[in-house]
């Protein structure tokens, strides 16, 4: 008799980031518990209160003692202890690529299973047959969601020369309509960044773009009118004429900054440009020709390729960063 039996991994260490602190816990904790694992959660140091409130709630649902454990503290001590501990069987991390490399190093001696969701510099490719008016309003929302502090936000826009001018004109108009304000106001589409230090980091990227010759056509500054002048705000920002080797084209900005690359006229060339980056999280291809889109899906080196708009596919689809050694890729298709 030959059969395959699926069993829980055991103890799962969960290390989550500051940008979506509770959501990141839920995404990892739910599946781990459903499959019979116990969990040790290390929430982000800068905003651990939500995780501690979750601990109070879990105490009331009659889980067996020790099923869910929450330990606060800096990643350099608590996170590294989880990654190296011999009785932790798996580590799930959402964080920077540098942190992911460190977790891999620490987990190697005990051969832990790893699930890593790291950085992204995600390409958006708009082909010459795309209807650039179709749901264009969604792209500013994608760029500015959570103030741009999302690993899966657009990182590089590659626009075909036939639709380049029309796309830029309409994209700029849509970005100008983004309401910057208090996140407690339902009309607000773009709130502040997480801290003064992170705002300074985003501003440094904007300065580098200007210094390296990219054309700043929108934003790039803090709001000056009260009360927003007192917060960690950056206005919606758009660069055009961004070249492949500029810092803003290579690195993850993690803010409401759009990088529109130089236009293209060759499918082969734009696939090469899209793959010319160390990140490989997600991507979009905007075309009416699904067969043409599938060619892009097969050749783009990213864990997710969206043909059209949107994002979804259900919990059985992976959401991980992959590069040339990718064993799984999810492709999401919508009519465009």
Image (cartoon, rainbow, N blue to C red):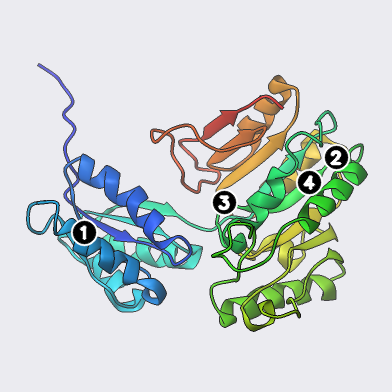
Q: Residue furthest left?
A: 65
- 1 and 4 marks in contact (CB < 8 Å): no
Q: Which residue is mark 3?
A: 152
Q: Residues within 10 Å of mark 2 (few under 14, many from 20)?
A: many
| Residue 266 position by quadrant | top right
**Which circle, 3 or 1, is nearer the viewer?**
1
Numbered marks: total: 4
Question: Measured from the top left, where is residue 57 in percent x and y?
Answer: 21, 59
Residue highlighted by disc 2: 160
Q: Secondary structure at mark 3?
A: loop
User: Label 1, label 4: how many angstroms apart (C-alpha)?
Assistant: 46 Å
Quick one: label 3 or label 1, which is nearer the N terminus? 1
Q: Which residue position is annotated with label 4?
A: 158
Of label 3 and label 2, which has the lower sequence position?
A: 3
Looking at the image, tell me whether mark 1 or mark 4 is earlier in sequence order. 1
Between label 3 and label 2, give the one nearer the viewer: 3
Vertical relation: 6 (above or below) 1: below
Report whether 279 appears left or right of 44.
right
Instruction: Sort mark 3 into few (<14), some (14-19) or many (20+) by Cα contacts within 10 Å.
Output: many
Badge 4 or badge 3: first in the primary sequence: 3
State which quarter of the image contains the N terminus: top left
Q: Is residue 149 above or below residue 288?
A: below
Which quadrant does the C terminus fall into? top right
**Residue 86 on image: x %, y %:** 17, 62
Q: Residue furthest top?
A: 1
Residue 57 circle label: 1
Asked whether, in this view, residue 75 is left or right of residue 277, the answer is left
**Residue at 21% of width from left, 46% of height from top?**
33
Q: What is the CA distance from the residue labelled 3 to the residue labelled 2?
A: 22 Å
């Amino acid at each position: 008799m030959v059969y395959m039996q699926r069993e829980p991994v055991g103890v799962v260490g969960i290390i989550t980031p500051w940008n979506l602190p509770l959501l990141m816990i839920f995404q990892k904790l739910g599946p781990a518990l459903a499959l019979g694992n116990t969990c040790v959660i290390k929430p982000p140091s800068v905003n651990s209160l939500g995780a501690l409130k979750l601990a109070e709630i879990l105490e009331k649902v009659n889980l067996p003692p020790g099923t869910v454990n929450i330990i606060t503290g800096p990643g350099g001590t608590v996170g590294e202890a989880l990654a190296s501990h011999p009785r932790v069987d798996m580590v799930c991390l959402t964080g920077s690529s540098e942190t992911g490399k460190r977790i891999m190093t620490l987990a190697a001696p005990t051969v832990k299973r790893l699930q890593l969701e790291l950085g992204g510099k995600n390409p958006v490719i708009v082909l010459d047959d795309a209807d650039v008016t179709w749901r264009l309003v969604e792209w500013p929302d994608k760029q500015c969601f959570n103030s741009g502090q999302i690993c899966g936000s657009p990182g590089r826009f590659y626009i075909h020369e036939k639709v380049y001018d029309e796309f830029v004109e309409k994209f700029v108009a849509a970005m100008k309509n983004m309401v910057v304000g208090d996140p407690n106001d339902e009309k607000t589409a773009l709130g502040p960044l997480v801290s003064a230090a992170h705002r300074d980091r985003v501003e440094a990227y904007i300065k580098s773009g200007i210094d390296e010759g990219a054309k700043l056509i929108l934003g790039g500054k803090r709001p000056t009118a009260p009360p927003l002048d007192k917060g960690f705000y950056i206005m919606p920002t758009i660069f055009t004429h961004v070249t492949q080797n500029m810092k803003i084209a290579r690195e993850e900005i993690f803010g409401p900054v759009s990088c529109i690359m130089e236009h293209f006229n060759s499918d082969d060339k734009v696939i090469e440009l899209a793959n010319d980056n160390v990140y490989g999280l997600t991507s979009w291809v905007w075309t009416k020709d699904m067969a043409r889109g599938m060619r892009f899906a097969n050749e783009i080196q990213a864990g997710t390729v969206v043909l059209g708009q949107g994002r979804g596919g259900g919990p059985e689809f992976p959401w991980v960063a992959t590069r040339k050694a990718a064993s799984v890729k999810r492709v999401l298709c919508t009519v465009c």
